[in-house]
Amino acid sequence: MNRTYYITTPIYYVNDVPHIGHAYTTLAADVLARYKKMRGYDVFFLTGSDEHGQKVEKAANSAGETPLELADRVVKRFQSLWERLDIDYTDFIRTTQERHKKGVSHLFTKVMEKGDIYLGEYEDWYCTPCEAFWTETQLMDGKCPDCNRPVDKLKEESYFFRMSKYQDQLLAHIEANPDFIQPKSRRNEIISFVKEGLRDLSVSRTSFTWGIPVPGNDKHVIYVWFDALTNYITALGYPDEAGNFGTYWPVDVHLIGKDILRFHAVYWPTFLMAAELPLPRKVFAHGWWTVEGQKMSKSLQNVVEPNMLIEKYGVDAVRYFLLREVPFGLDGDFSHTALVHRINSDLANDLGNLLSRSTAMTSKYFGGVVPEPAALQEIDEAYRAKTVEMVHQVDGLMDEQAFSKALQCIWEVISAGNKYIDETAPWTLAKDPDKKDRLATVMYCLLESQRIVNTLLSAFMPKTAVKALSCLGWTSPANDTALAWGLLAPGTVIAKAEPLFPRIEEKPE
Ligand code: ME8
């Protein structure tokens, strides 16, 4: 039986169209899922859409459609973008699906039967765009502390979840499991938040109807976060605790943006505690993208549309850039200049050039056939050892969701390859028939190191990696065993590589 690995993205609201922020989380999840698959894990990668709530109801009203019509229309935009971005998810859950509604009702009933959901009355400040209630003290200058927009005083009958009851248990769990909330700075924020005291949480609404009815009282719909978070288990077939739920839960990592950490690191674990279900192993909150130094927003008209980027630069350049440019967990800035710079320097110059040079020399000196290496000398051994060490390092970095560092580590080996060519000077060796063995060894090391590099890169840039590997005559699947040194068989026919990434000379916008 393979080890399992369950990874999720947030389920995105259907009242917005997808932008690079959404693409970022989904891409990171895809890279990790592909990587874990390559390392032999049985991976379940879940994404989906969050389709209930007042915002969707309002957006549908103003577009003159039913909420479900709106959801059906927008969800297609997400799904077609994921296809273009080569996102290889296992399942896509929509919160309007029966399987989800059934699981949410079950969870709600179970927690209510336990006495942890009770009927009360709610009065507080409510921010409609954020769908969040705030206490008087949480407001910033009388406005929503998250988005700085005006809030309304709301009083309504509401069901409450006894979140306060789980405060100590949650704190103890966070403290005993340093990996539970990552990165560390975010973990500290949550610890302070929990220490300030958890209040009971309103988990139903009567002010709108687009949602899952509270079992036994359909005046109320279930609060969007109780509904949305539960997707992570309903997609596995919950309440059926056998099947996929039994196989994949608890989740290995929920990848989310920092904006929704509190919901994932406080609300969700306490719901699970109440339901006596295991908690997620890790919640990782990545940072926020701005665009050319500014917050991305519809009103500023600076929303970066991933489809446009793919058309202009190609899918793998976009995949590479988003994960390389900014350490996962920190905020970052998107700019066309930075993207063009990465393409020209990392992809065209370093990665592409190395492959072109090596395959061109193999064609010229060995008729396009992988030569038989002789004994490795010190310089070859150092290059081999660096390649082998990279495989090990990348594995640890991927477990920490340190995508940018993993790519840096791979690029050190690519740069070492270019340097190795300069230092061994194959064109000089080629002039001396007595150095044929030496030349063969150098060529072999170059090709073999790149076979391993491109196998690792298949998680990041699937199409490019397949292209590069096929130039190297390697058509076996990219898997765990393919990462060992020495598998490229002498005698294999290689192809002279076309540039993987042509340089972009034009001035970027
Ligand atoms: O919050 N930079 O959905 P959502 C980086 N439905 N990431 C960004 C980003 C940016 N500028 N903008 C958005 C919801 N994101 C809920 C989630 S989960 C049970 C329910 C990404 O459509 C980031 O992952 O508003 C963030 O957490 C998510 O989009 C919010 O997506």
Image (cartoon, rainbow, N blue to C red):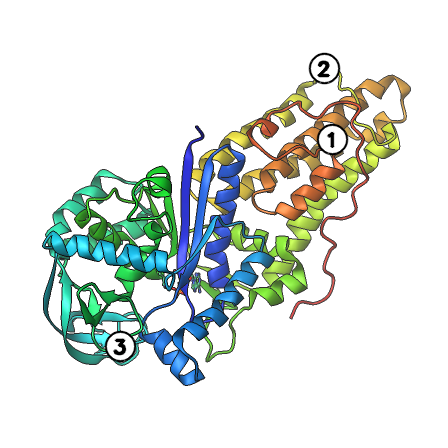
In whole angstroms, how far apart are the C-alphas of marks 1 and 3?
70 Å
Secondary structure found at label 3: loop
| Kind of residue at disc 3 | Phe
Q: Nearer the viewer, mark 1 or mark 2?
A: 2
Ligand 1 contact, mark 1 (Cβ < 8 Å): no
Query: Which tag, 1 or 3, sits closer to the chain's start?
Result: 3
CB atoms of marks 2 and 3 within 8 Å: no
Q: Residues within 10 Å of mark 1 (few under 14, many from 20)?
A: few
Residue type at mark 2 is Ala
Of the residues tagged 1 and 3, which is closer to the observer? 3
Which residue does the image show at 38% across and 51% down from the upper left? 235
* Cα distance in 3D space between marks 1 and 2: 18 Å
Q: Which residue is mark 2?
A: 375
Reading the image, the residue beneath label 3 is 208
In-front residue for pair 84/321: 84
Q: Does residue 22 appear to the left or right of 98 in the view shown?
A: right
Kindly identify which residue carries mark 1: 423
The picture quadrant where one finds residue 104 is bottom left
Q: Is residue 30 left or right of residue 360?
A: left
Q: Position of residue 254 (x, y in %)?
A: 37, 49
- Return the disc, 1 or 2, that comes first in the chain's sequence: 2
Q: Which mark is residue 41?
A: none
From the top left corner, tell me how far across and down residue 33 is, in percent.
49, 43
